[in-house]
């Protein structure tokens, strides 16, 4: 696999076929039960949404990673962004690609008028402790909140 040069760009609806396999690998790696059908449906909506940014980093021959960032509006902070997904292929890790995708998410969130970029680290992540340290090193802070969810 060619790793350099690396280009970062915004993905659009035409990129679904290229991004979907990475999303499937991302969810499988972290042990999530979300299947390919649901990922396809959700990724299709995200790629077309003005309230979302799907950024990809690629070499000349293939995608190496992606980041999904969305916005929402809440009472406490107004408009916020959430880095909902960040994945780099294992063979392309430790080359600064994830950091570039994070900075792209930060820049996009600022452009949207957001004052905060949030993320959730799921406990079923392959190495949740490492991820916490990684994101802290990239300017995030742990404010001690817990995310609770209820299936509908």
Image: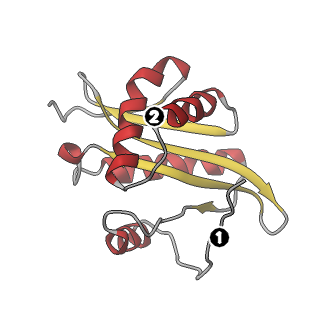
Give percent across and percent down for residue 15: 46, 22
Quadrant assignment, res 137: bottom left
| Residue behind mark 2 | 36
Does dot 2 land on a helix, a strand or a loop?
helix
Which quadrant holds the N terminus?
A: top left
Does dot 1 land on a helix, a strand or a loop?
loop
Residue name at image x 51 percent, y 31 percent: 37
Give percent across and percent down for residue 109: 62, 50
- Quick check: 63 above or below 65? above
Q: Nearer the viewer, residue 14 or 124?
A: 124
Give percent across and percent down for residue 30: 36, 56
Q: How many marks?
A: 2
At label 1, counting other C-alpha atoms closer than 10 Å, the crowd grade (few under 14, some 14-19, many 20 or more) is few
Toward the right, the furthest residue is 75
| Residue behind mark 1 | 148
- Quick check: 128 above or below 40? below
Q: Nearer the viewer, residue 93 or 137?
A: 93
Query: Of callouts 2 and 1, which one flags the residue occurring earlier in the amino acid sequence?
Result: 2
Residue name at image x 70 percent, y 45 percent: 112
Toward the top, the furthest residue is 14
Residue name at image x 21 percent, y 44 percent: 92
Give percent across and percent down for residue 80: 70, 57
Toward the bottom, the furthest residue is 144
For residue 42, side relative to residue 9 (left or right): right
Q: CA distance from mark 2 to mark 1?
A: 24 Å
Residue name at image x 73 percent, y 53 percent: 152
At label 2, counting other C-alpha atoms closer than 10 Å, the crowd grade (few under 14, some 14-19, many 20 or more) is some
- Quick check: 131 above or below 21? below
């Amino acid at each position: 696999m060619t790793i350099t040069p690396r280009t970062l760009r915004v993905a659009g609806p035409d990129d679904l076929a290229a991004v979907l396999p990475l999303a499937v690998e991302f969810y499988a790696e972290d042990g999530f039960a979300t299947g390919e059908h649901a990922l396809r449906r959700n990724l299709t909506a995200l790629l077309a949404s003005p309230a979302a940014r799907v950024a990809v980093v690629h070499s000349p021959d293939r995608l190496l990673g992606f980041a999904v960032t969305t916005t929402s509006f809440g009472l406490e902070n107004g408009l916020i962004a959430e880095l909902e997904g960040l994945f780099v292929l294992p063979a392309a890790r430790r080359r600064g690609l994830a950091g570039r995708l994070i900075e792209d998410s930060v820049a996009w969130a600022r452009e949207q008028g957001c004052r905060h970029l949030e993320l959730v680290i799921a406990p079923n992540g392959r190495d949740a402790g490492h991820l916490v340290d990684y994101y802290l090193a990239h300017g995030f802070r742990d404010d001690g909140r817990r995310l609770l969810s209820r299936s509908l």
